Image: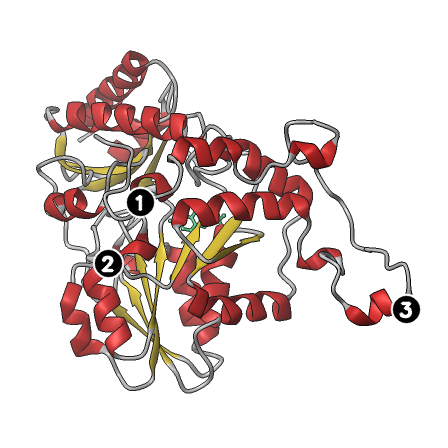
Amino acid sequence: MSDRSPTSPRTHSIETALTHTGRNPDNQFGFVNTPVYRGSTVLFKTLSDLEAQSQPYLYGRAGNPTTESVEAVVSELEGAYRTRLVPSGLAAITIALMSCVQAGDDVLITDSAYEPGRKFADGFLERMGVSVRFYDPRIGAGLSDLMQPNTRAVLAESPGSLTFEIQDIPALAAAAHAGGARLIVDNSWASPLYHRPIALGADIVVHAATKMFVGHSDAFAGTISTTEEAWEDVERIRALLGFFTSGDEAFQVARGLRTLALRMKEHQHRALDVASWLETQDEVEKVLHPALPSHPDHALWQRDFSGAGSLFSFILKPAPRAAVAAFVDHMQVFSMGYSWGGYESLCLPVTITKARTAVPWSEPGNLFRVHVGFEGIEDLKADLADALDRYRRAR
Ligand SMILES: *Cc1c(COP(=O)(O)O)cnc(C)c1O
């Protein structure tokens, strides 16, 4: 599996961008890393400086050298015109959507979208007079049939973060653009190392930087990267709403990014190992991992991705709730919790039914989502084997 994106050439390798971009040791006494800038007030020397408003920084809420160090790396990786660091992955989604719409407009959201993003659309955009519709994640070019004259944004997330459908980004982009809408893609799973939506036609790419970029479960951040055409709208909405990320959080993201390539390689390899092993186990009905040949979107994944993330799901044979408890309650190496992307492995039982409206979820059995971290691989499998054994006995 190559780490080069199949889509467009870069001036440097990803590894070099990750280690060199966004640092300027000459400006900071030779120290390797951009330090944490903390500050609201930025000083002006003269009235004419104040009136000219041409200093690189005017007020801390618009960013500082620490936040910009992260934005530079992500822009280079995503092949974007510019990037903004925002306080969370959810904020990246909400700002991106708001940048596209006004009252009377319409948005289309993949049925597989991260659930708080769905709730924002239903609970906030609807209140602001924007209609919200959900579409089948596998709709591809069929999106054209759903486009209305007032559709201004299409939100995709590939793969879906619980159910792992791969979306046809070039087809969605073509349909969205033909109808005058922008395509927003949540690229948190693959990271720009393994998938580059802008090169495939997306206008805006968002990341839950909290996950893979930070990589250690100890900070919140999101990023929004855009084409030149979409930039002004995104930056205007961010500024109007007052979203800002502190230098402290930005430093955690910058620090995580330096090792992203190594971590992604390791996560990819381990997650696939565990996923393939799970496929051979009796209690397992299905493993939902796009890099497995058994996955229904495997060919699309091969076409548009150059690697896979840490996260996948599996479905166990139907069993009562007590069996799910037996599975997760006594795990020794995996832990149960939200989020993912850290060094530690997580296993989360998930219920899909309420989160689907366009294509009701009909898979029988119990769904679990795992993030495979850096523990010993044999310990992880042994933990799952014991859990499967408890599940079988409780079923
Ligand atoms: C976690 C997550 C988000 C939201 O990120 P936060 O930083 O937790 O707000 C968005 N998209 C995906 C795919 C996620 O997994």
Q: Which mark is residue 169?
A: 2
Q: Is residue 248 left or right of residue 218?
A: right
Place of residue 36 in the rendered image (x, y in percent of width and height, measured from the top left): 70, 38
The first of marks 2 and 1 along the sequence is: 1
- Residue pointed to by mark 1: 9
In the image, residue 35 sits, relative to residue 108, either above or below, namely: above
Question: Is residue 47 visible from the viewing direction of this image?
Answer: yes
Q: Amino acid at mark 1?
A: Pro
Is the C terminus in the top left, top right, bottom left or bottom right quadrant? top left
Label 3: state its secondary structure.
Answer: helix
- Residue pointed to by mark 3: 47
Q: Amino acid at mark 2?
A: Ile
Q: 68 and 382: which one is in front?
A: 68
Place of residue 318 in the rendered image (x, y in percent of width and height, measured from the top left): 15, 40
Q: 135 and 369: which one is in front?
A: 135
Label 2: state its secondary structure.
Answer: helix
Q: Is residue 29 left or right of residue 344?
A: right
In the image, residue 116 sits, relative to residue 320, either above or below, namely: below
